[in-house]
Amino acid sequence: MRHTLTIAPQFYVTAPQPCPYLDGRMERKLFTALQGDVAERLNDSLSKQGFRRSQNVLYRPSCAECSACLSARINVEAFRPSRSQARVAKRNRYLQRRATSPWATEEQYALFRDYLDSRHATGGMADMDLFEFAAMVEETPVKSRLVEYCDPEARREANGGLRAVCLTDILDDGLSMVYSFFDPGLERDSLGTHVILDHIQIAREMGLPYVYLGYWVPGSPKMGYKSRFAGLEVYQNRAWQPIGNPEDYSSDTHPLSIDPIAEQVARINLPDTRPVRG
C-alpha cells in the first residue's frame, strides 16, 4: 500500500552570538536539517526563500532586532559585466576551470588556510583543521561540485598551480556558491570576482537563470562587492526584487523588523508531498 506523507522538517533557532558582519550586533539563525531522499527538493525550495546550505543544514538569519542581511542572487539574463569586471575576466583567462566531485584534498586545504590567515584570521573558521575542512566539503546530501581554477603553467608547484576553489551546489534554478576561497597573494587579480564571473558563465552554459551569492549586508565592507554585479536581486519581504540603488538600504536596527519565529516558520513554503511505501 502507498501513502502520501507531508514533508515537515523541524526548524530551530541558534543562541545569539556576535555578528560577523556588523560590529556590536548579535546574530541568530533559523535552521533545519537537510537529509533523506527529499534533501535536494528542500534545498531547491528553501534556497528560493533566502536560506543557505552549510553541510547538512539549511539556515537563514533570524536576528531579534536586525534584518540587514539579505539573500542575494544574480539574474544571469540581466547581467552585463562592468568595464572593471571585463578586465578581471581578461586578466584571468589563463586559468583553467576544473569541476570535480566534492572531495577535499591537501592542496585545497593549504590554499584555504592561506586564505583564512590572510583574510579572516579572527573569523569563525580560523581554527578549522583538515578534517573539519573535509567535512565542510564532503558532507553534502545534495548535488554539489568543487570548481577549481588552476594555472597550467604552474603545475610543478606543490599545490599543482591551484589558485581558487568554489564549493557549488547545483539547484533546479541556478548555481549556489556555498563557499569560495583563493590565493590571497594575487589580490590584484581579483580572483573572487573572477570566480563569480565564471559561475555566471557556467550558469549560462547550463541554461540556469540564477547564481546565488549568499548574503549581502548593507553597511558591511566585507559584503560590498556583491552590489557591484549588474542583475543583482535581493530577497526582501518574502520576494526577490532587483537591488536598485544599494545606498537606499539601511542596516539600522528596529525591534519590530523581524516577525516572531512561529510566523516565520509558518510562512515557509515546503516542497510537495512525497509518496512512501507503508
Image (cartoon, rainbow, N blue to C red):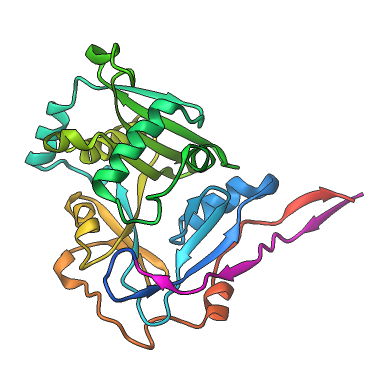
Residue 204 falls in image quadrant: top left
- Name the side, left or right, on which 124 lies relative to 264: left
- Residue 8 within the segment the image draws in magenta: yes
The one nearer the camera, 175 or 22, is 22
Which residue appears farthest toward the bottom when viewing the image? 255
| Residue 21 sits above or below residue 176 on the image | below
Q: What percent of the width, then of the height, locates residue 34?
A: 61, 52
- Name the side, left or right, on which 197 lies relative to 109: left
| Residue 59 sits above or below residue 185 on the image | below
The one nearer the camera, 101 or 259, is 101
Q: What percent of the width, then of the height, locates residue 155?
A: 29, 13
The one nearer the camera, 130 or 13, is 130
Which residue appears farthest toward the right when viewing the image? 1
Q: What percent of the width, then of the height, locates residue 122?
A: 31, 56
Q: Is residue 139 visible?
A: yes
Residue 166 falls in image quadrant: top left
Q: Is residue 206 visible?
A: no
Which residue sits at x=19%, y=50%?
230
Q: What percent of the width, then of the height, locates residue 73?
A: 33, 52
Which residue sits at x=8%, y=40%?
84
Which residue sits at x=33%, y=67%?
69
- Name the side, left or right, on which 26 lies relative to 43: left
Report the magenta residues as a range: 1-19
